[in-house]
């Protein structure tokens, strides 16, 4: 069993270090011999050319010394991040991650959802991780995409933790990684199932964004859609705060808690700007 004082990394010298040092000694002796020869046999005429050649050789020798200094002690470092987790997991501070978006056209809701999913899958204690999505445009399409992402997170987060997935953005992961015959059968089966669910979520989000409105039957699936009224616009709407994932209430498919996910949109009013302009004119 490892001690609490075990180091977080180890340093191992490479076998090629001895060869590099031997080569460096031989080459350095050759450089000293060349410089000795240049100084001892200084020409009686043509000093300008001799000085230029000598300065060039000095410059090249200095450059070689700088490069060789990095090759005398080549090492490999092996880190043990699990020791960091074991030693300080209880002392890790709570963190809040803010993801900002303002326009569902320039910043597609699917991209925002992928960013949220990669954040929720952080290798960090779930009870100390909170993700806030700051939607400055107050778009119901973005809220719907986050609602879909919160449901998919119940499968995606345990999948990442179970197989130590480093690329935690689903879109990038499924675009770059392909299962092959060397992977074990349980992983292949689960990978294909997770990818299928992601493609279904992706289709629902993109099709809803293309329509431009969230269907009525989907609005009934979450009370948060009641915050949006027909007269609301991206530049005129009240503040909206909705908790999509709450620790203790929402669990993943393995029965464990998920990080908190909160949707936030600040209040915007046309008349606030108008009143401010009139007030400034009055004061002037």
Image (spheres, rainbow, N blue to C red):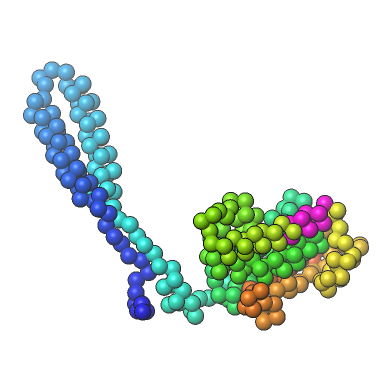
Residue drawn at x 62%, y 62% is 189
Q: Position of residue 226 (x, y in %)?
A: 86, 71
Q: Nearer the viewer, residue 121 or 181?
A: 181
Q: Nearer the viewer, residue 236 or 145?
A: 145
Q: In this view, which residue lies farthest toward the bottom?
A: 248
Is 202 magenta? The answer is: yes
Q: Which of the 4 image quadrants contains residue 126? A: bottom right
Q: Position of residue 195 (x, y in %)?
A: 66, 59
Looking at the rendering, the stretch of residues picked out in magenta corresponds to 201-210
Q: In this view, which residue lies farthest toward the top?
A: 45
Q: Nearer the viewer, residue 59 or 220?
A: 220
Residue drawn at x 57%, y 55% is 179
Q: Position of residue 98 (x, y in %)?
A: 64, 65
Q: Which of the 4 image quadrants contains residue 202? A: bottom right
Quarter of the image with the C terminus in it? bottom right
The secondary structure making up most of the magenta span is helix
Residue drawn at x 73%, y 74% is 243
Is 125 magenta? The answer is: no
Q: In this view, which residue lies farthest toward the right?
A: 230
């Amino acid at each position: 069993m490892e001690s609490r004082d075990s180091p977080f990394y180890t340093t191992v010298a490479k076998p090629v270090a001895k060869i590099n040092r031997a080569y460096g000694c031989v080459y350095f002796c050759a450089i000293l011999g060349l410089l000795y020869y240049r100084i001892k046999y200084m020409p009686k005429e043509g000093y300008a050319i001799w000085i230029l050649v000598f300065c060039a050789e000095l410059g090249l020798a200095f450059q070689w010394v700088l490069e060789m200094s990095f090759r005398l002690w080549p090492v490999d470092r092996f880190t043990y991040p699990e020791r960091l987790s074991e030693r300080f997991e209880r002392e890790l501070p709570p963190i809040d991650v803010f993801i900002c978006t303002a326009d569902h056209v320039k910043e597609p809701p699917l991209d925002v959802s992928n960013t949220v999913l990669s954040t929720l899958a952080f290798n960090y204690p779930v009870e100390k991780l909170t993700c806030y999505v700051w939607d400055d445009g107050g778009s119901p399409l973005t809220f719907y995409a986050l609602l879909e992402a919160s449901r998919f997170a119940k499968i995606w987060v345990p999948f990442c933790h179970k197989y130590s997935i480093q690329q935690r953005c689903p879109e990038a992961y499924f675009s770059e990684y392909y299962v092959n015959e060397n992977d074990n059968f349980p992983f292949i089966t689960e990978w294909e199932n997770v990818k299928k669910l992601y493609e279904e979520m992706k289709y629902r989000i993109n099709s809803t964004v293309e329509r431009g409105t969230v269907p009525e039957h989907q609005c009934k699936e979450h009370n948060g859609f009641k915050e949006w009224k027909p007269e609301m616009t991206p530049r005129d709407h009240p503040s909206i705060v909705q908790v999509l994932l709450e620790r203790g209430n929402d669990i993943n498919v393995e029965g464990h808690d998920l990080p908190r996910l909160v949707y936030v949109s600040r209040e915007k009013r046309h008349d606030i700007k108008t009143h401010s302009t009139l007030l400034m004119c009055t004061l002037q």
